[in-house]
Image (spheres, rainbow, N blue to C red):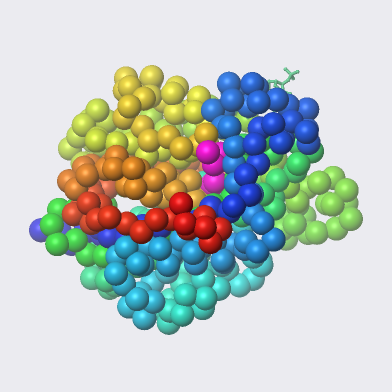
Amino acid sequence: MKRRAEITGWGKYVPEKVLTNNDLAKMVDTNDEWITSRTGIKERRIRTDTDTTTSMAVAAAREAMTVAEVDASEIDLIVVANSSPDYLLPAPANFVQHELGASCPALTVAAGCSGWVYALVTASQFIETGAYNNILVIGVELISYALDYTDRSTCILFGDAAAAVVLQPSTGDAGVMTFELGSDGGQAHHLWVPGGGTRNPVSQNVVDNREMYIRMNGQEVFKFATRKFTSCIKNIAEQAGMKPADLDLIIPHQANLRIIEYAAGLLGLSMDKFFVNLHKYGNTSAASIPLALVEAIQEGRVKPGDVTGMVAFGSGLSWAGAVVRMGEAVAKVAPQSVVAGVMQ
Ligand SMILES: CC(C)(COP(=O)(O)OP(=O)(O)OC[C@H]1O[C@@H](n2cnc3c(N)ncnc32)[C@H](O)[C@@H]1OP(=O)(O)O)[C@@H](O)C(=O)NCCC(=O)NCCS
């Protein structure tokens, strides 16, 4: 049997501070009704002064390592999906490796909201080849730093969070079964940060034009997302010898409830097939799918043997999907998640 990468540990961290739709209505010209009906989002978490990209990633990773019963000294590789680093250099994975007390290679994957699935697939290759046995795959985003809180079309959508899994070689048929990764860089300008990079370095002009913040063409991203969501789910299910309806649970990128509902309609699936937690967190970018996965496991929505489909889309524009069979580990009683140091 092919050696597969199985999810054997999971953990999450979300900041304590809650920003509701009503809070946003005091900051920009919007209201709870508009945000709820257009996106499904009710509230999101925003970093407090003590939260950093590294600290959030480390908290989620520690929880995942506890569930998997692996120590930092046993971790062979850390892969961090992130587009909101503490510093531009070095990449966040290096800080995470140091803070965890691990002495292994550390790799950062920057693929926006598709990043964690890209990271999962990348990490699974090292397990499948036999190169490594214990890999941390973390999705973390402190995306509030890149939001323009005068732009009502973007600031309502996103939130901060981290989530992580441990991958280990499977002893049975659990693990990453199939995947699809994609990029359409020709549409990059539909979701980007136009200033602060080498093409348009930080300057007074960049600051005055607020070009260091996320800019988005919402309607184009919506069209891209629904198209790629449906084709990707079909493709990864087919590679696994299944139809989308055969998947036990689909864990989609939590960008917008309307995107999920629209894609569900195109796939002919009921919403019961989809795990949704975006009403609590908004779009947490690279943390979105692992955060949903962790909560799906903690809520008992996935059982050993279940086949899940994960599908992400985002800046790039990019997309990524994977079919993952859950193993015996998901039957474990996990420790309660840490929310800003408070057990919940
Ligand atoms: C952003 C999004 C919710 C906007 O919804 P929409 O139905 O496309 O709305 P539109 O952009 O057509 O705007 C409709 C109106 O609402 C207004 N509007 C935009 N944001 C608003 C807000 N937060 N509150 C109130 N009104 C708002 C617009 O200004 C526009 O007003 P106008 O008709 O007077 O010009 C939607 O396009 C979307 O979700 N796109 C995908 C975005 C995404 O998921 N990005 C991340 C991917 S990883």
Which residue is most to the front?
Answer: 343
Q: Residue at x 29, y 69 (%)?
A: 69
Q: Residue at x 56, y 66 (%)?
A: 55
Residue 180 vertical placement versus 164 (above, below): above
Residue 255: x, y in percent?
A: 52, 36
Comparing 63 with 325, the one in front is 63
Comparing 194 with 97, the one in front is 97
Residue 209: x, y in percent?
A: 85, 45
Q: Residue at x 33, y 22 (%)?
A: 270
Count of number-bearing discs: 0
Residue 281 among magenta residues: yes
Comparing 273 with 107, the one in front is 273
Is any atom of residue 7 visible in this view? no
User: Is residue 237 found left or right of 261 in the rendered image?
Assistant: left
* Quarter-of-image position of residue 200: bottom right
Is any atom of residue 234 visible in this view? yes
User: Is residue 291 found left or right of 7 in the rendered image?
Assistant: right
Which residue is most to the left?
Answer: 1
User: Is residue 68 found left or right of 158 in the rendered image?
Assistant: left
Residue 7 among magenta residues: no
In the image, ligand 1 is in what quadrant? Answer: top right
Q: Residue at x 65, y 22 (%)?
A: 34
Comparing 140 with 112, the one in front is 140
User: Is residue 136 found left or right of 176 in the rendered image?
Assistant: right
Residue 64: x, y in percent?
A: 37, 62
> Which quarter of the figure is the N terminus placed in?
bottom left
* Quarter-of-image position of residue 48: bottom right
Residue 26: x, y in percent?
A: 78, 33
Residues shaded magenta: 280-285
